[in-house]
Amino acid sequence: MRIRLRRLRRQWRVVTALAVLAAVSSACGKPPDLEKELGTVQSWTATARLADDQRGRGAISRVYARQIRDRAAEALGQERKTLEQAARSDADRARARAATDSLAAAIRGLDQLVGRP
Amino acid sequence: MKKWLEVALGVVTGIGGFLEVGSIATSSQAGAEFGYRLAWVLLLGTASLAFLMEMTGRLAAVSHRSYVDLLREHFGIRFFLVPLVAVFLVSFLVLASEIGGVSVALQMATGVSLQWWAVLVAVAGWLLLWRGTFKVVEQGTAMLGLVAVAFAAGALKLHPQWGALGRALVPSSPAHDRARYWYLAVSILGASISPYLYLFYSAGAIEDHWTTEHLWTNRITAAFGNLFGGTLALAVLVVAALVFAPRRIRVDGYEQIALLLSTPLGRAGFVLFLATLFITCFGSTLEITLAIAYLLAQGFGWQWSENLKPGKDARFAVAYSVVLIAAVVPTAVGLQPLSLTNVSMVLSAASLPVTVLPLMVLMNDEDVMSTHANGWPSNLALAAIALLSLALFGAAIPLQILGGG
């Protein structure tokens, strides 16, 4: 009984160690994926533009449009850092800059409608 | 007449059960990223839940005991601890994300931070559970939940391509982003077939004193209630496919989802979206809190009923009070509600075998079911659902790592 218990404990430790290893390697090993990050920036740009358009038509409230603006600004701050790590060449950096500039312009558009923070 | 009223209320309740924070989030993510393509998963989830609810309802109506009660009695306390712990943990996470959903709706409406709202939502929920009866909780929120029909109106106004939508009901796999596609498929199934749904339904059958005379009501409620709820979840997916996918908007936060209905329905759509998110998530908050308290009370043999005064079933009342307070913590400490929702839906899917596999045994036990045991069509469906649950158990965690980002 005791031997069985000990064996079970050993197996449990191996499974736990493997799970931790898998989690750590998946979290730390990969550099950020440029295309994925550009997709996120593009998505927030489109969101801010849609909110701008809908606020202009009176379809959404000012309070809500402000929250979209704040979330988009938060995403812009995060993505600027992540894209810096993901860009490997000058061409990558130019694409990243164009994407973040576009998001910044969309946020400025929303700012004019809902007021600056 | 009374029977028809019961059936109508049961069908309406199906919306409250089906459409909640998980299905709104996963359907809108699926529509935004893959268009109509994941519609077949909603069909599969709806059909699976309808079968599971019909069976757990029949089990309760025939045996006059809930599924959890029978699970402990039939398999013994040592086996029972596995589903008890798994369902408790998963349902707790789902409950936390429902509270997050209600709080997000209130934040979007008022601008006041969702962390403050989470506490008020828990207090309001607790008061309703403490003072209300099962009927108030079940039917009150379900009737108000009819506001979710706004998604069907929004989908129709956007003129979906019916042919393409019909073709999407046949399973397919995309050439790109496969991990993300299957991750979303698992999330949708987790949102559709969450264990609390059929455990709550089974306990509800006992609360409503169902007998074999209610088997017809049970069948119609399970089939049409879920069909109704599943259709509305499909409407969310269609609206997201027509509003977000062409603009390449990915749903990374609940803040984005409110733009779905304001595009086809204008200001009314915006207000209806907030009302839908608030009511369906609040209804689910009450249902899951009760489902967890039922699970504990039935599992440990305590006195339980939402229809009794809290003093008469004190341990049951303490259980739902503690669970509700504890479930506020993730939102109150600032966890992202959408991330919490996604993780809880995937874990829901992974936990299915522990409640689906024992049902195969119980539904074929003539001592429990007498002449109402499963026939071959029900057994075939249950075997298919059991296989699906095992596949979800194996795939859920790897897909969370590969496609969850």
Image (cartoon, grey):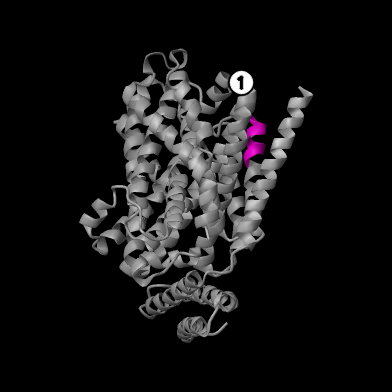
Residue B220, image x, y percentages: 32, 33
* Quarter that holds the N terminus of chain B: top left
Q: Label 1 belongs to which residue?
A: B76
Residue A13 in the figure: left or right of residue B201: right
Q: Which of B132 and B391 is in front in this view?
A: B391
Q: Residue at x 66, y 52 (%)?
A: A21
Residue B51, image x, y percentages: 38, 33
Chain bearing mark 1: B
What's the amino acid at mark 1? Gly
Q: Nearer the viewer, residue B396 or B306?
A: B396
Q: Which of B97 and A33 is in front in this view?
A: A33
Residue A3 in the figure: left or right of residue B278: right
Q: Does the magenta stretch include residue A28?
A: no
Residue B196, image x, y percentages: 51, 39
Q: Is residue B313 magenta?
A: yes
Say if residue B265 shows up in the picture: no
Query: Which range of residues does the magenta coloring cover?
Result: B311-320
Say if residue A29 shows up in the picture: yes
